[in-house]
Image (spheres, rainbow, N blue to C red):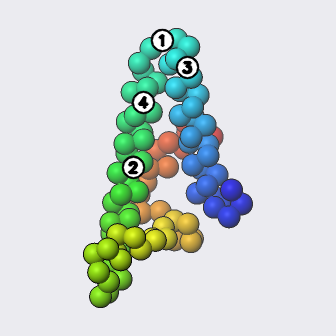
């Protein structure tokens, strides 16, 4: 996690929160935690999808090269996050 910096630490806390919510739903046999985690994961997935699709494709690359071209997230190299997802969750995961 040292290489991932703040993003990796934040995601780790977020996944711990998800795990606690799912375990609680399992223990209490309620749907609430499952629904919350599914909603948050969907939002997280959509945010990553939007960010990755907004990156420039290499010019002149074939479709196959674009599909298999590894993308580096700007979040992982020090750029500001393109979404405010974590600010919404901050009180829950700290």
Residue 29 percent location from the top left of the image: 48, 11
Measured in 3D between alpha carbons, the distance from the residue under mark 1 to the one under mark 4, in whole angstroms, is 14 Å
**Could you say which is closer to the camera, residue 63 or residue 19?**
63
Q: Secondary structure at mark 2?
A: helix
Looking at this rendering, what residue extends furthest in the top direction?
28
Query: Is residue 9 found left or right of 55 in the rendered image?
Result: right
Q: How many marks?
A: 4
Numbered tag placed on residue 45 in the rendering: 2
Q: Earlier in the sequence, mark 2 or mark 3?
A: 3
- Residue, disc 1: 29
Circle 4 — which element? helix
Residue drawn 37% across the image and 42% down it: 42
| First along the sequence among labels 3 and 4 | 3
Residue bearing the label numbered 4: 36
- Residue at mark 3: 24
Q: Quadrant of residue 78?
A: bottom right
Residue at image point 29% right, 81% down: 62
């Amino acid at each position: 996690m040292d290489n991932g910096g703040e993003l990796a630490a934040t995601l780790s806390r977020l996944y711990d929160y998800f795990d606690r919510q799912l375990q609680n739903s399992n223990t209490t046999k309620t749907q609430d935690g499952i629904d919350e985690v599914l909603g948050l994961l969907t939002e997280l997935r959509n945010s990553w999808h939007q960010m990755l699709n907004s990156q420039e494709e290499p010019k002149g690359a074939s479709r196959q090269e674009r599909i298999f071209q590894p993308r580096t997230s700007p979040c992982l190299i020090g750029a500001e996050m393109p979404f405010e997802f974590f600010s919404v969750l901050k009180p829950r995961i700290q």
